[in-house]
Structures are given as C-alpha cells and as structure tokens.
Amino acid sequence: MTRKRKIIVLVTGFSVAAMLLLSSLIITRAHSRQFAPRSRVGIAGVSEAWEPEDFIHALPDGMAASFRRAPNPNRPGTQRVTLQVITEDGRRIRLRAQLRLLEPRDPLKFELGFTPEPLSPWALFEARNQFDAPMAFSPAPTLRTTPGEQTLQLLLDGRSYEFTIHIVDTIAPRAIVRNIETFVGAPLTPEDFFDEIDDQSFVALSFVNEPDMTLYGETQVVEILLRDHAGNESTVQAELRITEQDDPPEIHGLRDIYVGRGGTIAFRRGVTVTHSSDAATLEIDSSGVNIAVPGEYEATYIARTPAGHETRVTVRVTVSEVTEESALALVEPILAAIIQENMSKTEQAQAILAWIRNNIAYNITGVHGSVLDGVYQGMNLRRGDCFTFYVLAKFMLDQLGIESVSMERYPVTNTRHYWLLLDLGDGWHHFDPTPIRTPAPNYGFMMTASEAEAFDPFGWGYFYRFDPASIPEGVEVVRE
C-alpha cells in the first residue's frame, strides 16, 4: 500500500513540473508577440553604435533589453544578434535578430567621364555585398564634369550616412595622329598632326622638340606632348616631311557651314592655306549662296600659288529659318526641364551653366554671327566655341528675365573671347560658361573683378581684359 502511494506522488510531481514549463512558454510567447525582433541593415565601420532597442519593433514601458551576443559594428556581412528582455514581473525572454553590414569601397574614387549616370548607391560598396538593402540618395547626386570631391547623403534603414566620393581624372589623353608633308615657310602647329583627340577635358598640345623646318626632302619624326587639365600626359609620334617643290597648296580648317537666314557667315574664320612659297592666296566663291532664302548651297575655296598651282574645295552651306520663335522652340524644353518654380536667380543661372557645360562640346570652328545663329549651332550641332557658349547662356538667361551685359576681350592680341556680366542680387560679377583648360575661379560662375583680373591660365598676363567704356553706365563689377 505504501509503495503505490509513492508512485502516485511521483507522477503527480512530474505533471506539475510539465504544467509550470508549459505555462512559462505560453507567457513567453505572449510577451514575444508584443515586441517582435527586428533585423537591421547598416554599414560596416561607419554605423552609429547599435543599441538593443534597435533590434526590437516596440519595447513596452517597464521592460529592459540587453545584448546576450552584441553585434560587431565593423564586420561586413550577416551576423546573428541575441537579445534578452526582462519583463515587468522579472521574467527573461530571449530574442534573435540579424544584422547585415555593407562594406564600403576603399577608396571611393570614380573616373571622370566613366561614372555611371545616374549613380547607383550600390556603387559605393564592394561587389561582394549580395543581399537586398533598399537605399537611396537624398538629394540625387549631380554629374560632375571636372575632378574634385562630392559629398553624398545616403538613406539606409532609417539612418542617414554621409559619404565623400572623389571624382578623378587619371587617364592620359589618347589621339589619332596623321603624318604631314608641308612646304618651306608654311606655318606648323601641334594641332596639325591630329585627326582626333580623346579625353574628358581640354588637352594642351606642345612639341617635345621643335621640328627642324630646314630639313628639306627628308622624313623626320615629330614627338608631341598631350597634357590634360588634370596633369595627365601622353606623347605621340608622327612623321613630317618638308619639301621645296612647288606642289599645290593645302587648305586647312574647312567645314560645312550652318547659319540662320539673314545671318553673317565668316567664311575665312579658322581656314588657313599652307604652301612652300609662303605666298599662296585664298579666294572664296560664295556667289551661289543666298543668305536671305533658307536652303542648301555650296561655296568653293580656291587656293593659288604664284606659280599657278591651284587647289579647290567645295563645302555645303545650310541657311536655316532661325527666328526668335524657332530659337525659343529649341531652348524652352531645356529650360522647362532644368528650372523649377521655387529656384532663386542664382540657382537658375547655375542650372543653365551646368546644362551648357554638360551638353555642348567645345570646338574652335564655331560660327560667329548673330545670337540666333549661335543658339542654332549650339542646340542643333551641340558644339561651338566661346561665342556659342556665350550666346546660348545669354539667350537662356533672357528668357528667365535675368539681365546680363555682353563682354568681349579688348584689345585682341591673341584670340577673341566672349562672356557675360550678371547681377543676381549681390552686385555685378563675371559669368563665363565656356569650359577653360584651367578652371576659372568659381568655375566661371560669379567671379569678382579681382578674381577675373588675377586669372591667367596661358601666361598672357590677362584673360578677362575688356574696354571699360563698353560697360553700360551704372554697371560696376564687385571688386572683392
């Protein structure tokens, strides 16, 4: 009888323990449903300190959380985070979550001209980061056209991170050269040896050693240095042969011409004739061109030597119907895309400068005519020289009601140059949309008189020199 009683006691004791364990599990699950674990995404080495509460969706008042296995904020990849929550009645509840840390690229450098556009946030991280992590830039980054630093704000899992990326230009200029046969006394420049130059910025050319212009009848190798504005250099070689014979003259710099109806054509601009006699003349037959009637025409360039040798080249002349309305039709869609209603005048001028710099290629054979001619060439051909950049900026600013003053280099001892004066609310400043080999102060945006006077990228002792009498009365450039 006594033995049976003991068995009953043991069974009853086991049932009570099981019930207590089951009751504990039920209570634990009930609490865990109140504050589910939360997995997080961050950035290795740059995230702020992680707190236990970061991994819980909602921790009720009166409860405390702590790490049983704290995360390592510097280790990229996925790691398990174990937490312990102590309830109001002293119970301990264990939660598990995950922390995924992205690994930033080192260094954060992007090559000028080869940066993806638009820039993806994933470009900031090593390629081995495979898991999904919704992220975005705020605001969206703008495309840089020159080397330098750019600060970006990245939004990731409720946190904001600041990154500084470096836009670099490390690629040396590349080019396709041509061999030249020229004559005694003919002008010769490094540019004459190139069919094409490939670089993301302006490239300066110079002879490593000056060609021997007295080496008649022999072929010599000419070495030319190419140096871009970032300092990257490359050298190329071409062959030069100088002859004394009276060969036909050569005409350089010819191009098809585009002009608006009633505009002006500078037929001789950028065109040269070379010959051993150094006495060749150039005649232009443009009698078939009617500048008053839109259409396709031809003009013939005729170079003659004293001995009677002659070279003829025909170019196409396109006369278009460029009116104020047609120019507006080209420009207004661009302004609608880049100008917002809440922009200040300064922001509007900056947006125009950025669009022109990013969309118009510099070309020394730009046509000088009216403002409409420049707008036509810039918008249709997407290339031109400083005149094209200047008139495009002026025309766009005029449409926004931003007053500008046209500026022209004076006196002209080397080359012509055009730019503007603007007053955006803090006095008149120099505004130059043309890209220059050595970036002007403020990249040409709102330069003071002192800054413009000190700018001398070519060793001329000046760049923005002008005739003070050409400025309208009452316009005075801010000095400092």
Image: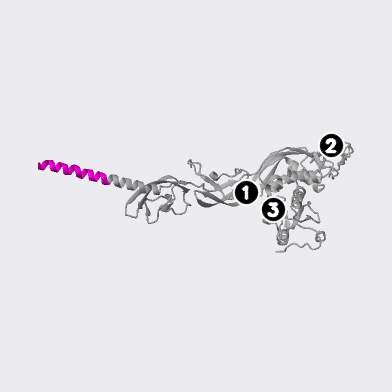
Question: Who comes first in sequence, dot 2 or dot 3?
Answer: 2
Q: CA distance from mark 2 to mark 3?
A: 36 Å
Viewer-side residue, 22 vs 195? 22
Residue 306 is situated, as x and y percent measured from the top left of the image, at: 89, 39
Residue under numbered circle 3:
348
Q: Is residue 365 visible?
A: no
Viewer-side residue, 385 vs 58? 58
Which of labels 2 and 3 is toward the front?
3
Task: Give the main secondary structure, helix, strand or loop, of the magenta stretch.
Answer: helix
Magenta stretch encompasses residue 286: no
* Residue at image coords 29%, 44%: 22
Query: Circles 1 and 2: CB distance less than 8 Å?
Result: no
Question: Who comes first in sequence, dot 1 or dot 3?
Answer: 1
* Residue at image coords 33%, 48%: 27
Q: Is residue 473 visible?
A: yes
Residue 336 is situated, as x and y percent measured from the top left of the image, at: 70, 47
Boundaries of the magenta span? 1-20
Q: Amino acid at mark 2?
A: Gly
Q: Amino acid at mark 3?
A: Gln
Q: Amino acid at mark 1?
A: Thr
Viewer-side residue, 408 vs 279? 408
Magenta stretch encompasses residue 14: yes
The label shown at residue 295 is 2
Query: Which corner quadrant holds the C terminus?
Result: bottom right
Q: CA distance from mark 1 to mark 2?
A: 40 Å
* Residue at image coords 26%, 45%: 19
Residue under numbered circle 1:
142
Q: Secondary structure at mark 1?
A: loop
Q: Secondary structure at mark 3?
A: helix
Q: Residues within 10 Å of mark 3 (few under 14, many from 20)?
A: many
Q: In this view, which residue lies farthest toward the left?
A: 1
